[in-house]
Image (tube, rainbow, N blue to C red):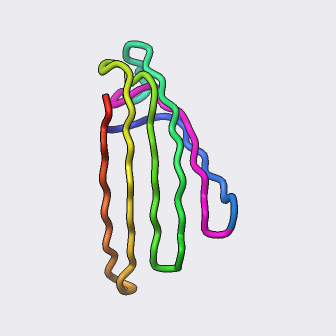
Amino acid sequence: FSHTGLLAEREIRPGVTAIGGATLGWNTGFDQTDNGFNILSGIRARPSDRVSVGLMASMGDTGYRGSGVLQTATLEVRLTDKVTYGMHDELPVL
C-alpha cells in the first residue's frame, strides 16, 4: 500500500519516538478517491545503536476499499558497518 500525506515525529524520551499523521486514503497519491481519509500512528524504539523496532497503524476510510486498518511492524539490526538485516510485516484488516 502507498500513502501520501503528512507525517510528524517527536522524540518522547531518549530512544523512543512517537509518530502521527494523516493521508487521503490508500494508493491515491494526492487524489482523494471516494473521500478517503486515514490517521497514522505509531512508535519507534532504538534500544541500542544497532537495533530499531517500530509499530505503525493506518486506520480510517481507505477510499476505494472502504474502511480498514493496516498494522505494520519493523525490525532493523545493523550487523556490521556495511550489513543491515531488516524485517517488515504488514497485516491489513479490512
Q: Position of residue 81 (x, y in %)?
A: 39, 85
> At 31% from the left edge and 37% from the top edge, which residue is drawn?
92
Magenta highlight range: 14-28
Give the quarter of the figure containing the C terminus.
Answer: top left
Magenta run includes residue 65: no
Magenta run includes residue 22: yes
Q: Position of residue 36 (x, y in %)?
A: 43, 20
> At 54% from the left edge and 74% from the top edge, which residue is drawn?
47
Q: Residue furthest right?
A: 13
Q: Reply above or below: 62 against 5.
A: above
> At 61% from the left edge and 63% from the top edge, which residue is drawn?
16
Q: Residue furthest front?
A: 93
Is residue 46 found left or right of 65 in the rendered image? right
Give the quarter of the figure containing the N terminus.
Answer: top left
Give the quarter of the image for residue 79: bottom left
Q: Reply above or below: 15 against 24.
A: below
**28 or 14: nearer the viewer:** 14
Q: Position of residue 23 (x, y in %)?
A: 48, 31
Q: Position of residue 49 (x, y in %)?
A: 52, 79
> At 39% from the left edge and 69% from the top edge, which residue is drawn?
76
